[in-house]
Image (cartoon, grey):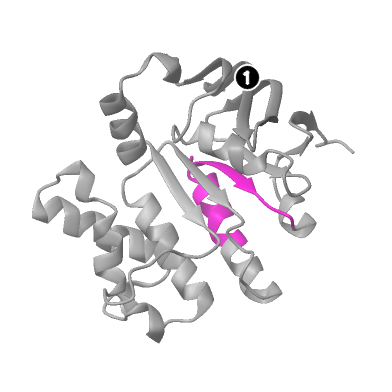
Amino acid sequence: MTTLYALEGVQKTYRAKGREIRALAHVDLTIEQGDFVTIQGPTGGGKSTLLQLLGALDTPTKGSISIAGSELGRASAGELSALRAGEIGFVFQGFNLIPTLTARENVAMGLEPLRLSRDERDARVAEALAQVGLAERADHRPAELSGGQQQRVAIARAIAKRPRVLLADEPTGNLDERTRDEIMDLLERLNADGLTLVLVTHDSAVARRARRRLRLDHGAVHDITRR
């Protein structure tokens, strides 16, 4: 398999109220293209920090992170912005849909940074909504959709850019068990088609569905796949 992410000696510290807080401590990690990885751990253990670094939303205090061989620490602000816009999809627990826009319009908003032609944009939006099973709900606004359907729109918005990787922070946290399983079925199908998945979750039922399970505790990463 091809290595997508390579993290070497990654540390991340913050200063708060005059004291230093270590969020990540010397993380060495590789994630392969097409992999399905879940990250668990206690609140404050560094999970969201790691996801932000993988998403090129932040930079490490020490160490290096590369994606597809390109070191993020050496990239310009413009290069990082282009990477986030075209190569990395994001899905969050809270859906983050614009309530006044339809499903189609919400998905299209995610493509704005790519400056596609109208025909290409419309084709990608239609394709993404079909992939998540919402082609017939394209003209519905978020308030007219269930929680699971809203999360499907959020996933469609993320995959419409055709990213290398989908980073998800508690994507099923607001859903009941049945809807959670439906969303995970969808994500597994996308992974089977080649999309790399990295999910942060507190839900062990979600974590067990991944091929690779990581645990982050006190800033240290442990592979618990075989436990």
| Picture residue at 77% right of the left edge, 45% below the top | 41
Q: Is residue 199 magenta?
A: yes
Q: Amino acid at mark 1?
A: Val
Q: Report which residue position mark 1 lands on.
A: 10
Q: Decide: is 40 above or below 74.
A: below
Residue 226 at x, y percent in the picture: 86, 36
Quarter that holds the C terminus: top right
Residue at image x 57%, y 64%? 183
Circle 1 SS class: strand
Q: What are the residue bounds of the magenta stretch?
A: 184-202
Q: In the shown orientation, is residue 212 left or right of residue 101?
A: right
Q: Residue furthest bottom?
A: 144
Question: Residue 98 at what x, y percent from top left?
Answer: 33, 69
Q: Is residue 84 left or right of residue 152?
A: left
Place residue 141 in its image quadrant: bottom left
Where is residue 96 drawn, in percent x and y?
42, 63
- Horizontal side of 81 relative to 95 (left or right) equals left
Q: Position of residue 163 (x, y in %)?
A: 38, 40
Is the residue 180 above or below the residue 108 in the image? below
Instruction: Between residue 151 and residue 196, name the one nearer to us.
Output: 151
- Write the residue at 25% across / 58% down: 109
Displayed quadrant of residue 17? top right
